[in-house]
Image (cartoon, rainbow, N blue to C red):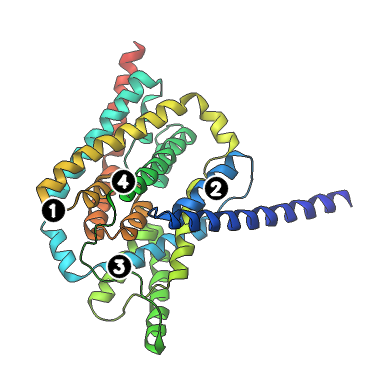
Amino acid sequence: MKIINKISQSKYAVVGQWLFFIVLAALSGWFLEKVAMPAALLLGPMLCAITMGVLGVKIRMPKVCFKYSQGIIGCLIAHAMTLPILIEILGMWDVMLVTTVVTLLLSVLVGILSVRYGGLPGSTAAWGTSPGGAATMVAMAEDYGADARVVATMQYIRVICVVLMAALVSHILGDVHVPQEETIVVMQGSQTAVHFFLTLIVLLVGVYLGRFMPAGFLLIPMLLGTLLQLLGYVHIVIPHWLVAIAYGVIGAYIGFRFDRETLRYVMYAMPIMFAASMLLIILCGVSALFISWWLGVDYLSAYLATSPGGLDSLSVVAIDVHADIGLVMAMQTLRLFAVILTGPMLSKYIARFAVEKAS
């Protein structure tokens, strides 16, 4: 009987924690929207999840919810991807290539500094400072012998710093209003309902196929939706309430990655992790000045395009402030695949500096 009572109490506790989190996250998102903070519906739940996780709450956002929320954001981006935008992106291939190389070099510099002066193991620092694809970097780091727990903490500290800084910079600079179609379509009439149903099919198929490539849960729905919309087979329709849920789930998933046990395990390295993340963000922000001048685009779009991940979170901010979503997604995606391809080589290179220090 005691065992049954304990199980019942634990179930009630979990339900209570979820209800408390949902209410608190909704209120936080509402408050941040009232003070005109970009990506408020992502930031509110993320900050609440971090706080509750550190305080010892055991609930976690199911990964399946995170996957489909990424897919929703991918469909949302697909709606904004028109043919003129794609043509414009293709004309920027040289700039995007240079920007990707610069970002990788900056991440190598930060990784070397983390090894030299932060006391972090070489391969762990290399994977932890890789600018993008947090989940992919953690998986690859484990395969190559790095401490996956430390890498995961470094990656998600970077993601949180990037999101907060992007929201802050966007709040200071204000909306840029790059000319493009309205991103979120209000549903009305039977025709819109049909397109919403077709959008859900794109979402389901895209998320299923997304299992077979890095960041595929966002990229495949985005590519599939863009292709079908350009061909005229479907008009991507995402209602406001579904977007709000997706934003909240992504924020909560990131925030709940932090708990007492994880922080206790990596507490010794927290200052250098935070410093490394901020240094990389600042260096990328400086490079955005050059990109903005070179392309003749607004600084906010260039800043979001050069920020070191994550792909889903930055796309939310870019959509929210009406930045050049095509530029942001193109540069972020290119950098993601560059990081995946060069990760093993760069980690070995950075590890050399740890050996030199020890000798």
Indicate the amino acid at tag 3: Ala
User: Which residue is denoted by mark 4 in the rendering?
Assistant: 169
Q: Is residue 215 left or right of residue 297?
A: right
User: Which residue is denoted by mark 2 in the rendering?
Assistant: 49
Q: Is residue 237 shown above or below 330?
A: below
* Dot placed on the residue nearer the N-terminal end, 1 or 3: 3
Q: Are the two marked residues, 2 and 4, in contact with CB atoms closer than 8 angstroms?
A: no
Indicate the amino acid at tag 2: Ala
The image position of residue 104, as x and y in percent, is 24, 38
The image position of residue 12, as x and y in percent, is 74, 56
Q: Residue 354 falls in which quadrant of the image?
A: top left
Q: Nearer the viewer, mark 2 or mark 1?
A: 2
The image position of residue 232, as x and y in percent, is 25, 81
* C-alpha span from label 1 to label 4: 26 Å
* Nearer-the-camera pick, 97 or 344: 97
Q: Is residue 268 shown above or below 228?
A: above
* Dot placed on the residue nearer the N-terminal end, 1 or 4: 1
Report whether residue 68 is seen.
Answer: no
Q: Nearer the viewer, mark 1 or mark 4?
A: 4
